[in-house]
Image (tube, grey):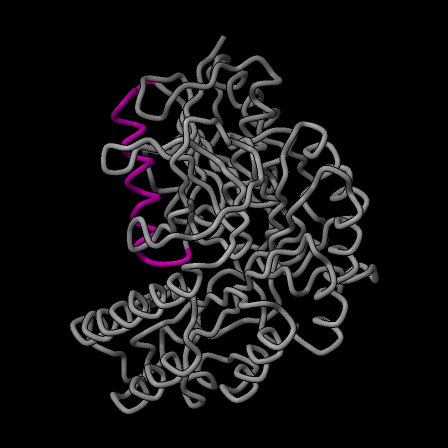
C-alpha cells in the first residue's frame, strides 16, 4: 500500500476538488497520511491567483521533495495550468495534472507509476504535458464531474456547482487557468446534496469560480432555480452562497429567495474598488451607484443580512484621491467583513502591463487603513446582536481563555459560543446574545 500526503492551496473550489481526489485515492487503496510526514506520493493542489500563491505553490512542491527525495511529487491545479514552462523546468515536480484532469488522478498516477517501474517515465523529470494531464482549458466545454460523499467537517459541506469565468477582469488570471463557464447538471448537484443530508450534514455551501453564471451555458434553470430545488431537500437546514457577482442581485432574484427560510442571509458581493474610474480600469461591469442599489435591495428584503466583500488596493493608476473615494464608499456601505488585498501583477493579464504601477509601500499603507476600518465596522455589525436571539449551528468544542465552549456560526456566519456541559456539535440551537466573548465571537446565554 502506497502512502499519499496531500496539501491544498487556494480557494473553496480547490478545497472541494482536493477532498474528492483524496476520496478517490482512498477507494483505490492508498493510505492517506499528514503532509508533514514521510510519504511515497505527495500531491500539492496549487493556486496562482497572486504572486504569493505562486511562491507558496513552489515552496510546498520543494518541501515535499525534501521530505522524501525518492517520493513521487505531483503538482495539480491552477499553477500547473498557468505556468507550464516553469513546471517543465522544475526538477521538484515528477507529474503535473491540470484543471479538468483532477478527476482522472488515480489512473494518471497508476500509469505514471507503471512507466516509472519499467524505467520509462517519459519526458524530462517524468512530466507529461501532452493533454493526458494538462488540457487547453480555454477550449473545453465539459464540466469536470466530481462527486463528494464525505468531508472532514461534520456539519457543513461545500458543493461545487460550476467552473470557469467569462468576465476577464483586467487583473485576473482565473479565466486562463479555469477556462470558460461550465455548469454542473442540476440533478447531479441535488443527488450529491441529498447524499450528504442522509449522512447528517445540515448546511450546504454552493461554491464555484463564478456561481452567478450558473446554468447560462446549459440552458438550465439559473442559480435561483437551483437554490429552490435544494430548499426542498429534507435534512438540509441551511443553504449558503459563495461569492456573487453584484449584477445578479435584482428584484426578481430577491423576490424568489427572500421567502426561503433555509437560505442564509449572508451575501458576499465582490466589489474590488469603491471608485468608478478604478472599476473601469479593472473591467468590472458596474458602477458604485449600481452596487449600492444591490446592497439596498438585499437589506430591504432580508433581516440584517451579512454583506461581505473583496477590495483591491493599489491597482495600477490608483491615486490617493481614488483611494479616498474607495475608503469613503466602504465606510458608507458598512460591510460585515472585508477581505483586503494588495494588487499583485499577474503575467498574462492586461493590468500587469498598465502604466502607473503603485509602489509596494503605498499599497501597504492603504491596506492598513482599510484593515483598520474593517475591524471597526465588523465589530459594530456583531454588536448589533447583543440582546437579540441568535440561531447557531454548533460545529466544534473549543477552549477559549481556559473555558470549554461549544462553538458554531449563525446564519449570517457570525461565530458564536455557548458555555455548557452538553455536546451541541451538529445541532442547531437558539440563545440570547449576552455580549462579545472576543472581538470576533458572540457569547450566548
Q: Nearer the viewer, residue 21 or 351?
A: 21
Question: Picture coordinates of residue 77 (x, y %)?
Answer: 49, 44
Residue 158 point in image, percent of width and height: 58, 43
Residue at left offset 20%, top offset 69%: 364
Does residue 444 appear left or right of residue 341 in this picture? right
Q: Is residue 20 above or below residue 277?
A: above
Q: Is residue 347 visible?
A: no
Which residue shows up at 42% across the image and 49% down it? 415
- Frontmost residue, 428 versus 376: 428
Q: Is residue 316 left or right of residue 196?
A: left
Image vertical order of residue 305 relative to residue 98, above or below: below
Range covered by the magenta-colored residues: 49-70
Check the image and report above or below for 426 versus 72: below
Nearest to the observer: residue 6 or residue 111: 6
**For the view shown, which residue lies furthest in the left direction?**
361
The answer to which of 381 and 355 lies nearer the viewer is 381
How many numbered callouts? 0
State yes or no: residue 303 in magenta: no
**Is residue 144 left or right of 364 when viewed as pictured?**
right
Q: Position of residue 416 (x, y in %)?
A: 42, 47
Q: Residue at x 50, y 64 (%)?
A: 306
The quadrant of the rendering that contains the C terminus is top left
Q: Does the image show residue 254?
A: yes
Q: Residue furthest top?
A: 1
The residue located at (29%, 76%) in the rendering is 314
**For the stretch drawn in magenta, what is the main secondary structure?**
helix
Specify the quadrant of the image occupied by residue 379.
Answer: bottom left
Q: Magenta segment: does it hold 51?
A: yes
Looking at the picture, how far across and down is residue 348, in whole percent? 43, 66
Amino acid at each position: 500500500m502506497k502512502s499519499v500526503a496531500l496539501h491544498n492551496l487556494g480557494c473553496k473550489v480547490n478545497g472541494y476538488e482536493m477532498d474528492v481526489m483524496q476520496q478517490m485515492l482512498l477507494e483505490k487503496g492508498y493510505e492517506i497520511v499528514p503532509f508533514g510526514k514521510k510519504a511515497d506520493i505527495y500531491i500539492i493542489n496549487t493556486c496562482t491567483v497572486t504572486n504569493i500563491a505562486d511562491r507558496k505553490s513552489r515552496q510546498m512542491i520543494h518541501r515535499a521533495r525534501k521530505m522524501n527525495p525518492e517520493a513521487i511529487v505531483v503538482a495539480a491545479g491552477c499553477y500547473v495550468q498557468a505556468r507550464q514552462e516553469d513546471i517543465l523546468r522544475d526538477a521538484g515536480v515528477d507529474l503535473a495534472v491540470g484543471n479538468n484532469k483532477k478527476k482522472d488522478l488515480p489512473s494518471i498516477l497508476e500509469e505514471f507509476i507503471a512507466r516509472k517501474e519499467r524505467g520509462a517515465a517519459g519526458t524530462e523529470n517524468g512530466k507529461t504535458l501532452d493533454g493526458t494531464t494538462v488540457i487547453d482549458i480555454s477550449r473545453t466545454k465539459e464540466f469536470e464531474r466530481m462527486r463528494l460523499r464525505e468531508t472532514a467537517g461534520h456539519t457543513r459541506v461545500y458543493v461545487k456547482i460550476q467552473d470557469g469565468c467569462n468576465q476577464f477582469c483586467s487583473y485576473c488570471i482565473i479565466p486562463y487557468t479555469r477556462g470558460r463557464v461550465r455548469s454542473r447538471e442540476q440533478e447531479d448537484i441535488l443527488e450529491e446534496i441529498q447524499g450528504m443530508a442522509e449522512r447528517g450534514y445540515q448546511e450546504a455551501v454552493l461554491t464555484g469560480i463564478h456561481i452567478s453564471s450558473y446554468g447560462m451555458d446549459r440552458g438550465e434553470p439559473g442559480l435561483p432555480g437551483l437554490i429552490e430545488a435544494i430548499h426542498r431537500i429534507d435534512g438540509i437546514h441551511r443553504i449558503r452562497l459563495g461569492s456573487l457577482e453584484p449584477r445578479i442581485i435584482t428584484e426578481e432574484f430577491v423576490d424568489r429567495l427572500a421567502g426561503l427560510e433555509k437560505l442564509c442571509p449572508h451575501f458576499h458581493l465582490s466589489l474590488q474598488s469603491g471608485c468608478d474610474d478604478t472599476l473601469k480600469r479593472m473591467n468590472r461591469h458596474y458602477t458604485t451607484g449600481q452596487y449600492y442599489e444591490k446592497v439596498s435591495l438585499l437589506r430591504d428584503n432580508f433581516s440584517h443580512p451579512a454583506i461581505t466583500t473583496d477590495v483591491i488596493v493599489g491597482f495600477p493608476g490608483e491615486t490617493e484621491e481614488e483611494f479616498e473615494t474607495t475608503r469613503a464608499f466602504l465606510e458608507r456601505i458598512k460591510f460585515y467583513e472585508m477581505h483586503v488585498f494588495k494588487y499583485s501583477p499577474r503575467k498574462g493579464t492586461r493590468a500587469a502591463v498598465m502604466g502607473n504601477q503603485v509602489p509596494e509601500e503605498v499599497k501597504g499603507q492603504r491596506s492598513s487603513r482599510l484593515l483598520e476600518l474593517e475591524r471597526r465596522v465588523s465589530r459594530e455589525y456583531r454588536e448589533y446582536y447583543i440582546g437579540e436571539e441568535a440561531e447557531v449551528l454548533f460545529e466544534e468544542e473549543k477552549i477559549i481563555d481556559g473555558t470549554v465552549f461549544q462553538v458554531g456560526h449563525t446564519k449570517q456566519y457570525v461565530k458564536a459560543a455557548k458555555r455548557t456541559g452538553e455536546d451541541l456539535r451538529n445541532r442547531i440551537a437558539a440563545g440570547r446574545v449576552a455580549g462579545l466573548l472576543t472581538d470576533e465571537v458572540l457569547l450566548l446565554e
